[in-house]
Amino acid sequence: MKSSPVHPSVSRRWPLALLCAVQSCERFAFLAMLPLFVLYAQERHGIAAPQALLILALFQALSYLGGLPGGWLADRVLGTRKATLLGAGLLACGYGLLALDRAELLWPALLTMVVGHSAFRPGLHVLLAHVADADQQARERVFLWHYLAANLGYAASALFGEWAHALAGWRWLFCGATAASVVAVVLMVAGLPWLRAQATRAVDDSAASSRSSGAANMTAVWLLSGVAVIFWLTAQQAGSSLTVFATMNTMPSLTLLGYTTPIGPGHFASLHGLIVLAMLPAFLALHGRSTKRRPSAITLMIWGYVATAGAFALMALAGLRGGDLGRVSGAWLVGCYLLLSLAEVLLAPLGVSLLTQLAPKHKAAQAVGLWFAGSAIGNGLAGVLGLCWNRWPHHRYFAALALVSLAAAIVLWLRRVLLDGLTVVDANARSQATTQPWLADTKEPLTAPLSLAALSIVLPLTLVIATGLPLLVRAVSAIGGGLAILFCGPYLCSHVLALWASSGNPAAS
């Protein structure tokens, strides 16, 4: 008897639920431990706070940078399903070693977890892309659901971590993280048949649509990953500069509609997560409406960077209105977190969705690894920028963040038409958009804009170092050079990387 066809939305429902549950378990385990790691290192291993902070920063950076070799391993050796399962198993082992609470197991546990994250993150995101098949709108919805699941896991882990440490100690906290990781492994093993079928269907759809796997798509991946550095740089401020501003420069109470409520840095941090959780279902509902003029993913991402720029412009205004030296109303931070939450919803899930769609099928996990490498670079830049917090007025610090966010929006806007062309679902339209127009535009027509961008940076800086010029001329040149770096730097770097990537690919010639 011939089986009846299954509607795509039904066939992807169970694999999506499975992968979202796996992601929730992984986030639950990781973020139950992460906020308390410095305290754990001090109490159980006698590590001083500065060294513990350094260890934590290196651990996070290596976990994200490891996505590059992890993605290569998934694409070339293991396959995405085996790599994801291996990563989940290594994470369970790492938390299990910490649960044993022995000093000699700290470093092996951290190393095991770094390798686990390196294999798990790229593989899971590629499996999510397989669930969506070749449908662009379905892919965006899949990653929105995934991001909602990750945030739910984060919210639950914060409550569990504090409760387990306070009532039962460190061992039970890590036992809970181990149990969540084991559940993720069990779910992965149970869902392998579903995931295998989805991967087979995704390969068939990819072959039917004849998606280009040459320099055009990989150039777009490099561009998105390079611009994403700005997103991670600004997202990191929620746990750094904005927390410090909430502690030192914000009133300890908030008055709304005549009611006064005590509020502290922890409340603002939780507010950010709650707003994201509230926005995601609303955004999913709006996204599900099929409209003829629905904005593309690139357009939404541009607005995400604009919202980020607006959030930090608001904080710069708060600094000018008294937040540089004194305290201002908490309403400034509330407005900032509203805009940052909107930007996060527009940038994080849609960015990964677009990346997996544009990536050549044999480099999908490596493309996700590039995205997470951008996260590591952005987090590192956030640490470097943090050194300027006590040296600059607060309004200048936040204005710099607003300017680089606006520069990222400009970079995407300049490439919007070409990126939209690469995401056209129709095979003929995609074939026309991903061959000669993109490659021609990345060579000859780009020579003039790239030269102008480089000159706008080099020329003012040359005048700065010319000691024979008047001090006023050198000062104005320094300001102009700084603005040129903020606005033209991301554009220049992204296209230099794109040209380098295409020059190393034979398909580019």
Image (tube, rainbow, N blue to C red):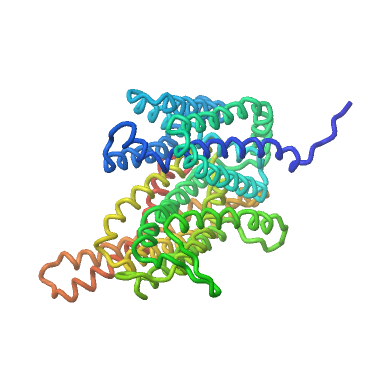
Residue nearest the viewer, comparing 230 with 422? 230
Observer able to see residue 363: no
Total labels drawn: 0
> In the picture shown, does residue 399 fall above or below 189?
below
Residue nearest the viewer, comparing 94 with 190? 94
Residue nearest the viewer, comparing 435 with 372? 372
Q: Please, which residue is most extreme toward the right here?
A: 1
Residue at (57%, 59%) from the top-left corner? 300
Observer able to see residue 395: yes
Residue 284, given in percent of the width and then of the height, sits at 66, 54
Q: Please, which residue is most extreme toward the left here?
A: 468
Locate residue 179: give its quadrant: top right
Locate residue 280: give its quadrant: bottom right
Residue 447, given in percent of the width and then of the height, sits at 38, 58
Residue 361, given in percent of the width and then of the height, sits at 56, 37
Residue at (68%, 26%) from the top-left corner? 193
Query: Split into 4 quadrants, where in the image is the C terminus?
Result: top left
Query: Split into 4 quadrants, where in the image is the N terminus?
Result: top right
Residue nearest the viewer, comparing 139 with 95? 95
Residue 265, given in percent of the width and then of the height, sits at 42, 57
Taking the image as shown, residue 359 lies to the left or right of residue 193, namely left
